[in-house]
Image (cartoon, grey):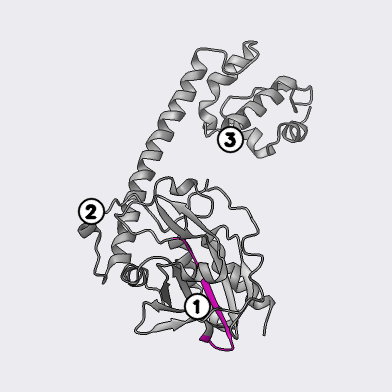
Amino acid sequence: MQISELARRAGVTTKAVRYYESLGLLAPGRLANGYRDYNEHDVRLTREIRALGSLGIPVERTRPFLKCLTAGHRHADDCPASPAGYRDSIDELTQRIEGLTARRAVLVAHLQQATHRGSRVSPADEGEDLMTDYTSVPADLPVPEDDGAAAHLPGTKVPRLELQGTGDAACRLDALGAGRTVVYIYPLTGRPGVDLPDGWDSIPGARGCTPEACGFRDHYQDLLAAGADGVFGLSSQETDYQREVVERLHLPFQMLSDPALSLAQELSLPTFEASGLTLYKRLTLIIRDGMIEHVFYPIFPPNEHADQILSWLRDNPV
């Protein structure tokens, strides 16, 4: 067969085939006219090179595997020399992982120093574990399901409730104005150096409060431009705790404190238990002229929630 057919059947380019030949990994026959003549064995060798390459084994190191096939073995790793190729690649990956881990530790350290700069709380003061990064969301978090606990909220009147904010004055939720206000409600914000409740990452919808806050911070001006008159975060954490969060994360909006879960009682908002604490489930209220216009629940992933709010505001102009 010609080189183009070999390349097509093996899933590689003709340039790659010529490169394999230059390394002596392929040795096609020749026709009377001098053209290369590839056979089924060449197809098998080329496919093996491609498969090993997908595992990170360089072309130059595939030779023991190819020799094993050429010797008549069913599998390219049936020969003693082949596992050595695996081990060499594993050792290289281990070194790369260790190097990346070290780089990550340095980056996290710089991140924590940057987020604490100018704050009253420093990593050194709290004995902070620099490898505990609350600003990112783990990839394997459980996804919360819609249990219908917020279905009754749209169209509900906001109760006359005053909550202390991180600003100078308290905030009345029923007096936010005729425009749209975004009130995102969350369980609790992790603080560097302070352990999260036991099993936090295994609770659907619990992890991700800091990334969610950072998302609202980064999109704050976009949200205002899209029609929001204001943004508030709300949790059951005390005001002093939230002031530290606002300062550390440089949030341009207030956080409201509801340690008595008064809003949950007034509106029958969903909550959950963790380490003896009763905490809000993550949800967001769009309040307009004293009424709940729209509710986001459940929310996932939390680090993309501000984008979801922004898209809704743009799709539903006043």
Q: Residue furthest left?
A: 125
N-terminal label among 3 and 2: 3
Q: Whole-Å distance between the Cαs marked 1 and 3?
A: 47 Å
Q: Secondary structure at mark 2?
A: loop
Question: Where residue 289 sits: x, y (%)?
Answer: 60, 86
Image quadrant in which the C terminus is located: bottom right
**Local crowd size for mark 3, using a 10 Å CA cut-off: few (<14), some (14–19), many (≥20):** few
Horizontally, residue 53 falls left or right of residue 128, namely: right
Question: Where residue 287 sits: x, y (%)?
Answer: 58, 79
Taking the spot 58% from the left edge, 35% from the top edge, the residue there is 54
Q: Looking at the image, which is closer to me, 36 or 69?
A: 69
Image quadrant in which the N terminus is located: top right
Q: Tell me whether circle 3 and circle 2 mark residues in contact (CB < 8 Å).
A: no
Q: Which mark is residue 211?
A: none
In reply to whether residue 183 is colored magenta, the answer given is: yes
Q: Looking at the image, which is closer to me, 236 or 101?
A: 236
Q: Which mark is residue 54?
A: 3
Up the image or down, 99 lies above or below 172; here it is: above
- Amino acid at the residue labelled 3: Ser
User: Circle 2 sits on which residue?
Assistant: 127
Question: Where residue 250 sits: x, y (%)?
Answer: 37, 73
Q: Which callout, 1 or 3, points to the residue nearer the camera?
A: 1
Q: Which mark is residue 231?
A: 1
| Range covered by the magenta-colored residues | 175-187
N-terminal label among 1 and 2: 2
N-terminal label among 1 and 3: 3
- Amino acid at the residue labelled 1: Val
**Local crowd size for mark 1, using a 10 Å CA cut-off: few (<14), some (14–19), many (≥20):** many
Q: Whole-Å distance between the Cαs marked 1 and 2?
A: 32 Å
**Local crowd size for mark 2, using a 10 Å CA cut-off: few (<14), some (14–19), many (≥20):** few
